[in-house]
Amino acid sequence: MIRFPAEWEKQTAVLIAWPHATGDFSNRLESVEDTYAIIADTITEYQRLFIVCRDEDHQRHIQKIVQRHEDIDFIHAPVNDIWVRDTTFLTVEKDHALHYLNFQFNGWGEKYDFAHDNALNHKLANTKYFKGKSHHDIDFILEGGSIESDGEGTILTTSHCLLNPNRNSSLNKEQIEEQLKNHLGAKRFLWVNQENLSGDDTDAHIDTLARFCSPNTIAYTSCDEIDNPHYESLHRMKLQLEVFRTFDDKPYNLVALPLPTPIFDEDDEPLPANYSNFLIINHAVMVPVYGDKNDAVALARLAAVFPEHKILPIPCRPLVHQYGSLHCMTMQFPEQARG
């Protein structure tokens, strides 16, 4: 039996890839590194952190910025993008052991160069934590940000991404579901028919739209401003979520997370800032904030959902300039298999 753990289960570590001067964040590297340092120092208060960096020089640079060196493992590997949610191993349980699945990555539908990112897991497989563990290459394109698991066999996803012909064009919906059943142990699927947020180039990853907080609770991106371009589509998404049922055939407890005031880049193009891109770690929930009036609303609503976790606001405004946020740039690894 295969099981895809939920994010709130006990973790051993989180992985990030540190930006550098020749990457996409080169025009605002200082502010982005400030955010990365906060994220790194926060994670290492609760658990171990893996940092992918370019080489020894890059590692030494990072070590001057972060605080808790004893809780960090550095991994030297090239990457095209820092959005490791979509490029690193997905972890499943099988036969009471953890297995690391290397799905294929094609630059979110061949929008960007991806050779280094698609090869990253083979680099990770030879590092201290992953060496000797069970790894499997899967001939199927799948990004971690495109699926949500409740840990009990339910996969929440969007048709706009998983059924997009720029990923697995030869497969229909039933065949894609079969892949997720075979590799992730999925028992049922909640398909959201929802377009992407403005500025999102992932074709509507679910981790910007709706997230499992427990097997019966979903937090979702919402909009109450009628003049906002996302108002109608997000209202339609809410109606879809209201129809979904848990394994016990009950409606989900739905928690609305308002959109922050729209953020634009230097060319006045909208950026995909949202609060659904939070990260659950051991005993805490890290929530992206943007210096917006709705930061407090999102934090309060998530605090009610996670009463046993500390809710930690993380300033992520610099990150959205490359079209992602906190969850997109991180990947957690479960501590151990259950029972």
Image: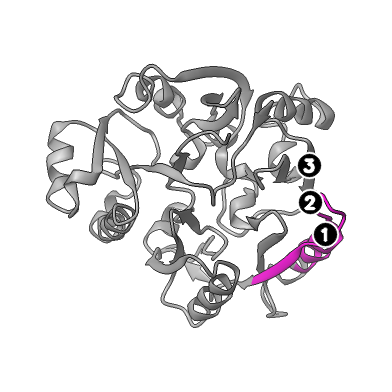
Q: Residue furthest bottom?
A: 293
Left or right of residue 79, residue 69 in this image: left
Instruction: Specify the amino acid type for callout 1.
Output: Gln
Q: Position of residue 307 (x, y in %)?
A: 54, 70
Picture quadrant of residue 230: bottom right
Vertical position of residue 275 compared to residue 13: above or below:
below
Identify the image quadrant of the N terminus.
top right
Q: Nearer the viewer, mark 2 or mark 3?
A: 3
Image point (29%, 25%), residue name: 128
The residue singled out by tag 1 in the image is 240
Q: Can you see residue 18?
A: yes
Which residue is more in the foreground, 309 or 237? Answer: 309
Left or right of residue 255, residue 63 in this image: left
Instruction: Specify the amino acid type for callout 3.
Output: Phe
The residue singled out by tag 2 in the image is 193
The residue singled out by tag 3 in the image is 189
Left or right of residue 294, residue 17 in this image: left
Identify the image quadrant of the C terminus.
top right
Q: Position of residue 119 (x, y in %)?
A: 42, 22
Instruction: Specify the amino acid type for callout 2.
Output: Asn
Left or right of residue 11, residue 146 in this image: right
Q: How many numbered discs?
A: 3
Picture quadrant of residue 109: top right
Vertical position of residue 16 compared to residue 308: above or below:
above
Q: Position of residue 77 (x, y in %)?
A: 30, 28
Specify start and end residues of the magenta stretch as a single range: 235-256
Q: Nearer the viewer, mark 3 or mark 1?
A: 3
Picture quadrant of residue 171: top right
Q: Secondary structure at mark 1?
A: helix
